[in-house]
Image: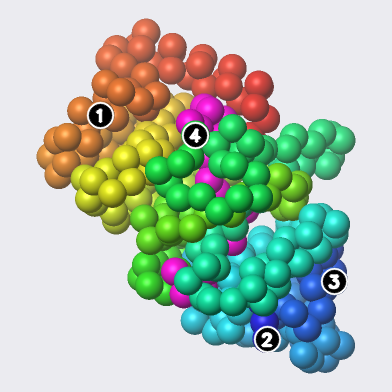
Amino acid sequence: MKYITFAVPCYNSQDYMRRCIDSLLPGGEDVEILIINDGSTDSTAEIADEYETLYPNIVKAVHKENGGHGSGVNKGLEMASGLYYKVVDSDDWLDKDAYQKLLDKVKQFFKAGADSKLPDLFICNYLYDHLDEGISREMNYRNVFPTEQICGWNEIGHFLPSQYLIMHSLFYRTEILRESGVVLPEHTFYVDNIFAYQPLPLVERIYYMDIPLYHYYLGRDDQSVNERVLMKRIDQQIKVTEIVADCVDLTQVAARYPRLAVYMRRNISIMMAISSIHLLLIGTKDALLKRDALWNKIKTENPKLYYQLRCQTISGLTYLPGKFGGRLTVDGYRLAKRIYRFQ
């Protein structure tokens, strides 16, 4: 029985993937680790094969043509045999003690009986790790979810501005992901936002563990969240933002789970804000036209959502008129970046 499938998408990850994989191996034969070699040109493939040879009952090396991070996530989900599915980026890792606590809890739920009582989603804390600076910041959800109790969306608290559900904090039941139909676009960055968003309305049973499980490494110059890199890839950020805004009918969600609808709308707001701010940072005429086009698309296709985003959420503050409005937006972003250390 495989309780968790870990997918580790790798592209030219030879310098750091061992740390990631080694952090997953303590799960032993209760887990499977799919190392997805996404057409790497360095020694990634050989390292993946090495781990499969050493741990044949745990690790599978999967070699495929390059399709980007989303393609690796899709391939892992296609192959997954575990009860739960977790993506771990090849430069990140799991805390050993927290990992064991989570795995023990998953096994406990499974051995207790019926599938209908299994959590659809486990949520754990994650850490922003700026290793080069010796700085680590843990993100938790203590004010949102009851600790180690099953709950539903109608029992959750309110998210703070710094809190949102990202891929790193989520362990979806594999069946839920497949039922949601989530398929990430290839050759596109920032697709983890889709993965963390689209399946949420299918989740009925949530279980939060207040443990520092996932270490999210920040500091490489080529990381997709690096401000300079994000500006270069702004078209991909816009593409993902539009997919997220369109992939779930929030009116239907609100009818069943009002609090979830509030969170999901706020999630769209955050993504709209990120796109708007970085287009302002680029500052060219073309970038400002793209900013207008992004907002006008929402306005045309979903006027109600447009009104909510402009008037009821933070993203409205990133689409202020004139040069002064633009400066105010950028200054606010700089301040938030210094406080929350999210890049």
* Depicted 44 relative to depicted 214: above or below: below
Asked if the residue under mark 1 is in contact with the one under mark 2, i.e. CB atoms within 8 Å, the reply is: no
Which residue does the numbered mark 2 point to in the structure image?
Answer: 1
Select label 2 or label 1 by which is in front. 2
Please state the horizontal and vertical placement of residue 251, each as a whole percent of the image: 21, 45
Please state the horizontal and vertical placement of residue 178, each as a whole percent of the image: 42, 74
Please state the horizontal and vertical placement of residue 223, each as a whole percent of the image: 64, 49
Disc on the earlier residue, 4 or 2: 2
Whether residue 11 appears in magenta in the rendering, the answer is no
Task: State the CA–CA distance, disc 3 to disc 1.
Answer: 46 Å
Instruction: Give the secondary structure at mark 4.
Output: loop
Please state the horizontal and vertical placement of residue 24, each as a whole percent of the image: 78, 69
Instruction: Give the secondary structure at mark 1.
Output: helix
Q: Residue, x 43% and y 58% (percent of image)? A: 204
Kind of residue at badge 1: Gln
Q: Residue, x 70% and y 72% (percent of image)? A: 107
Q: Residue, x 78% and y 60% (percent of image)? A: 101
Whether residue 166 appears in magenta in the rendering, the answer is yes
Task: State the CA–CA distance, disc 2 to disc 1.
Answer: 46 Å
Question: Which label was assigned to residue 321?
Answer: none
Task: State the CA–CA distance, disc 4 to disc 3.
Answer: 34 Å
Asked if the residue under mark 1 is in contact with the one under mark 3, i.e. CB atoms within 8 Å, the reply is: no
Which residue does the numbered mark 3 point to in the structure image?
Answer: 26
Task: State the CA–CA distance, disc 2 to disc 3.
Answer: 16 Å
In magenta, the rendered stretch is 158-176
Which residue does the numbered mark 1 point to in the structure image?
Answer: 308
Q: Quadrant of the N terminus?
A: bottom right
